[in-house]
Image: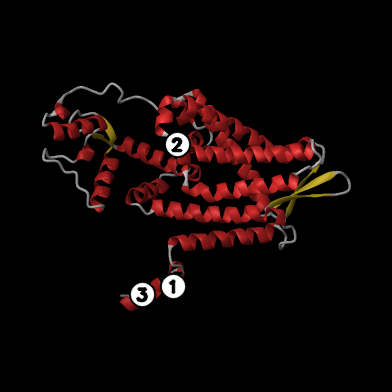
């Protein structure tokens, strides 16, 4: 048998003991990985573009903010449960379809209307395209060299990937990928602003700092990025250095702000696949019947997890009627809470809410 001393010694060898927190460990390992990849990709730092240094600093700060926010969120008891179970369910056959619906085509937003779906497609894929181009350039994972024969060499992770004509279609898309992304984001943001200003319900619920500021930041980045191209192509570089600094500053500010504002749901979005798998998998096993109306509303597993999480937080919703509030469907739960104030047993009235199955 192992003694307590030997067990403690083994525990002391854990890599976690070298760091003050999970946040510190995540940041250290991530930055170390980025430096190693950049060292390899830039051929021992011989191809580093110092003009992109500001973007690099902003990206590292963004990564730190993201880890801080994600770890704080992930340590909550409900999040721990569905992330742990969601990871185990990634092997489900439906996972690729779910990932495409949630992360690629935003199928779940179609229920809210075609206008909002197009708006999200433009903003979402515009930002993804911009990140796919910008981050590899910033960290030196991809760059271009040009020979005297009129061909560009695309270098990826330190290896010559391919040669393309300087005036060819591939080179044109490489030059203008960020312009295409900026046009997509500008169109999507304008659609979002129009909806927020015209829709009375949206106007009543939104706040400038939380709802409008992120859109204005994206719009400012896109417009200043497009102006750089206009200055280069049509104005022979007039005021381009100044505009380059303005654009870079706006990107850095947005990256620093992103993990702590409404835009934080963008890097968090992949976790929605875990939640969907969790709901579908356990719903297929056994569904929970509402204690009042008898309708199936969630899986038995989810209902039990809710009760368990409430117990962890020392919150008990065991009612005098012999059930837990989490064992009621949402309409019956609302009616039961009303009955607690009114004294009338409204939860026993077999009338469904008119909008309880509404989409969106």
Q: How far across and down, in percent of the image, does residue 76 sit?
A: 35, 52
Q: Which residue is pictured at 59% across the width and 50% down the height?
A: 252
Q: In percent of the image, x 30 and y 26: which residue is there?
A: 356
Q: Earlier in the sequence, mark 1 or mark 2?
A: 1
| Looking at the image, residue 207 lies above or below residue 54 | above
Q: Residues within 10 Å of mark 3 (few under 14, many from 20)?
A: few
26 or 182, which lies in front? 182
Residue 47 x, y percent position in the rendering? 74, 57
Q: Residues within 10 Å of mark 2 (few under 14, many from 20)?
A: some
Q: Which x, y percent locates residue 190? A: 57, 30
Q: Quadrant of residue 166?
A: top right
* Residue 328 higher or lower than 134, as above or below: above
Residue 268 position, x and y percent, is 47, 45
Name the residue that disc number 3 marks: 8
**Near-viewer residue (66 or 243):** 243
* Residue 253: numbered disc: none
> Disc 3 or 2, which lies upstream in sequence?
3
Location of residue 201 with respect to 309 vertically, above or below: above
Tell me which residue sits at (27%, 49%) in the image: 309
Task: Tell me the CA gap for discs 3 and 2.
Answer: 43 Å
Can you tell which mark lies on residue 94?
Answer: 2
Residue 235 is drawn in which quadrant?
top right
Q: Earlier in the sequence, mark 1 or mark 3?
A: 3
**Residue drawn at (56%, 46%) of the image:** 254
Judging by the rendered image, the residue that carries numbered circle 1 is 13
Compute the Cα span from label 1 to label 3: 9 Å
Secondary structure category for the residue under label 3: helix
> Which quadrant is the N terminus positioned in?
bottom left
Pick the residue in front: 354 or 154. 354
- Whether residue 291 is visible here, answered yes or no, is no
Residue 36 appears in the picture as rendered? yes
């Amino acid at each position: 048998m192992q003694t307590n001393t030997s067990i403690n010694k083994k525990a002391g060898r854990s890599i976690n003991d070298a760091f003050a927190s999970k946040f510190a460990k995540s940041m250290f390992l991530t930055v170390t990985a980025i430096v190693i990849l950049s060292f390899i990709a830039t051929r021992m730092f011989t191809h580093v573009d110092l003009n992109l240094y500001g973007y690099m600093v902003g990206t590292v700060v963004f990564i730190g903010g993201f880890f801080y926010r994600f770890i704080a969120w992930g340590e909550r008891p409900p999040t721990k449960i569905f992330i742990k179970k969601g990871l185990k369910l990634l092997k489900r056959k439906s996972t690729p379809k779910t990932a495409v619906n949630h992360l690629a085509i935003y199928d779940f937003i179609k229920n809210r209307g075609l206008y909002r779906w197009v708006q999200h497609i433009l903003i979402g894929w515009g930002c993804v395209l911009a990140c796919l181009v910008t981050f590899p350039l910033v960290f030196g994972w991809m760059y271009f060299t040009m020979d005297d024969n009129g061909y560009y060499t695309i270098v990826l992770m330190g290896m010559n990937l391919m040669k393309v004509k300087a005036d060819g279609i591939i080179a044109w898309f490489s030059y203008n990928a960020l312009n295409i992304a900026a046009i997509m984001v500008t169109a999507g943001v304008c659609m979002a602003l129009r909806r927020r200003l015209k829709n009375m319900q949206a106007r009543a619920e939104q706040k400038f700092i939380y709802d409008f500021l992120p859109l204005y930041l994206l719009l400012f980045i896109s417009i200043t990025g497009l102006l750089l191209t206009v200055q280069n192509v049509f104005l022979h570089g007039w005021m381009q250095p100044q505009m380059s600094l303005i654009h870079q500053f706006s990107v850095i500010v947005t990256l620093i702000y992103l993990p702590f504002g409404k835009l934080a749901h963008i890097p968090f979005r992949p976790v929605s696949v875990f939640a969907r798998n969790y709901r579908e998998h356990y719903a297929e096993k056994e569904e929970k019947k509402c204690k009042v109306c008898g309708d199936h509303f969630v899986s038995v597993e989810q209902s039990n997890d809710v009760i368990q999480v409430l117990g962890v937080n020392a919150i008990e919703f065991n009612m005098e009627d012999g059930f837990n509030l989490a064992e009621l469907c949402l309409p019956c739960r609302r009616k039961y809470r009303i009955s607690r104030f009114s004294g009338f047993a409204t939860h026993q009235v077999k009338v469904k809410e008119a909008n309880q199955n509404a989409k969106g």
